[in-house]
Image (tube, rainbow, N blue to C red):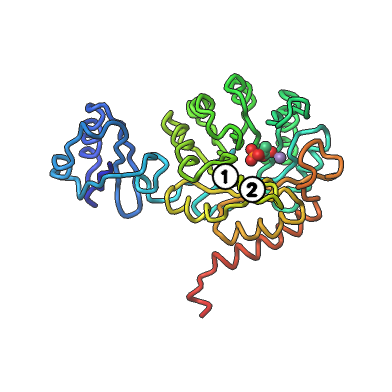
Amino acid sequence: MIAILKKNADSNAVAHLVSWIEKKGLTAHVSHGENETIIGLVGDTTKIDPFLLESMDIVQRVQRVSEPFKKANRKFHPADSVIDCGGVPIGGGNFQVIAGPCSVEGDNLVRIARRVKEAGATMLRGGAYKPRTSPYAYQGMGPRGLDLLLEARAETGLPIVTEIMDPRDIDEFLSRGIDVMQIGARNAQNFPLLKEVGKTRVPVLLKRGLAGTIDELLMAAEYIMSEGNDNVILCERGIRTFETRTRNTFDLNAVPVLHELSHLPVVADPSHATGYTRYVEPMALAAVAAGADGLEVEVHDDPAHAWSDGAQALTPEMFDDLMARIRIIREAITADACQER
Ligand code: PEP
Ligand code: MN
C-alpha cells in the first residue's frame, strides 16, 4: 500500500503519520520526489484502514500495490535510485562500466586494471571466490584474491566488484572495504546469503538466477532490501533456455521491464549471457541501446590462458574498441531526439 501525500504536507505531519504507521507494526518507507512525497507501507497492511488513511489531512490518495515486491517497487520510489559504489554513482542517468577478468589470478590483475581504466572502465571486477560447476575446477584465490583486488584499487582508484558466496565471508569483505559485493546467478535464491548482505550497507550487484524470472530477481532484491540495505543493483546475465548456440540467452527485454517495475539500477552482463568473445561486443551495444545503467564485461590480457571463462573474455584492445562504440550509442540514446528533427 502507498500513501501519496499532498504537495504542502509539512514535515511534522509526515513524521506523525510515519509513527502512526509504525505503531501498527508496519514499516514506513518515505520517498521524497521532485513533485510528490510517497509513503510506502510494508508489512501486514490488513491492519490499516485505507479509508481512514485517505481521510487524513496530508494524504492525497491511497493505492494498493499488488506486486509482492515493495521496497524494490517503482510505485514506492518513483525516481530512479542512484547507488554510490565507492564514490562512483550508478543509476538515474549515471552509466558505468565494470570490467576485469573472471577470476583474480595474480599480478596480471593490476595490468588488466590499468588497461581497462585507460579504456574508460569505471569499476574493476574479478572473482576471488568462484562458483564452479565442478568441485575440481579452480575455486578462486580466496582472501589473497581480495588483497590483490585492493592492490589494484590502490593503483588505479577503481572501486572493486567481487563475488561473495558464503555468509561466513561477510566480515572479511567488510573489513577490507570491498566496494560492491556481487551475488552470482547460482546464489540468486540463496535466501540466508541475501539476508546477510542485507544487514550491511555495502552495495550489492545482484545477478539474475540461471532460470530465474524477472519477478524472482525482484523478490531476491526485496530479501536484501527488507533487511535494510537499499543499495541493490540488478543484473541481467542471460537465462537458460532451449537454445544451445550460446552459453545463455540474453534477455534484453528484462532491461526496460525492470526499469518499469523498479527504481533500482539495471546492469547487463553480455559476457556470461553469450559465452563467446565474438558475441560480446554486439550484445553489449544492444544492452546499452536498451537503456542499461551499466555493463559488466570480462576482460583478460591473455584469454587463451585465463583460469576461467577465457572463451568469453575480451582482450584489452577489443575492450578499447567496445568503449569507443559505447560512447557513440550513449550519445545517441541520451540526445534530445526532438531537437534533431
Ligand atoms: C561471474 O561474474 O564471473 C559469474 C560467475 O557470473 P554469473 O553468476 O552470472 O554466472
Ligand atoms: Mn565469469
Q: Residue 234, position in %: x, y? A: 53, 43
**Please, what is the three-letter code of the amino acid marked with disc 1?**
Cys
| Picture quadrant of residue 328 | bottom right
Residue 130 appears in which quarter of the rendering? Answer: top right
Find disc 2 in the rendering and name its residue.
269
- Characterize the local packing of mark 1: few (<14), some (14-19) or many (20 or more) Cα atoms within 10 angstroms: many
Q: Is mark 1 within 8 Å of ligand 1?
A: yes
Q: Does residue 159 appear anywhere in the picture?
A: no
The answer to whether mark 2 is within 8 Å of ligand 1 is yes
Q: Residue at coordinates 54% horizontally, 32% vertically from top-left?
A: 202
**127 left or right of 264?**
right
Q: CA distance from mark 2 to mark 1?
A: 7 Å
Residue 235's tag is 1
Label 2 with label 1: CB-CB less than 8 Å: yes
Question: On the rendered image, what quadrant is the N terminus found in?
Answer: top left
Using the image as rendered, state which of residue 243 and residue 206 is in the foreground: 243
Q: Secondary structure at mark 2?
A: loop
Query: Which is nearer the N-term, disc 2 or disc 1?
Result: 1
Residue at image coords 53%, 53%:
255
* Ligand 2 quadrant in view: top right
Residue 32 position within the rendered picture, expressed as x and y whole percent measured from the top left: 34, 46
Q: Nearer the viewer, residue 57 or 225?
A: 225
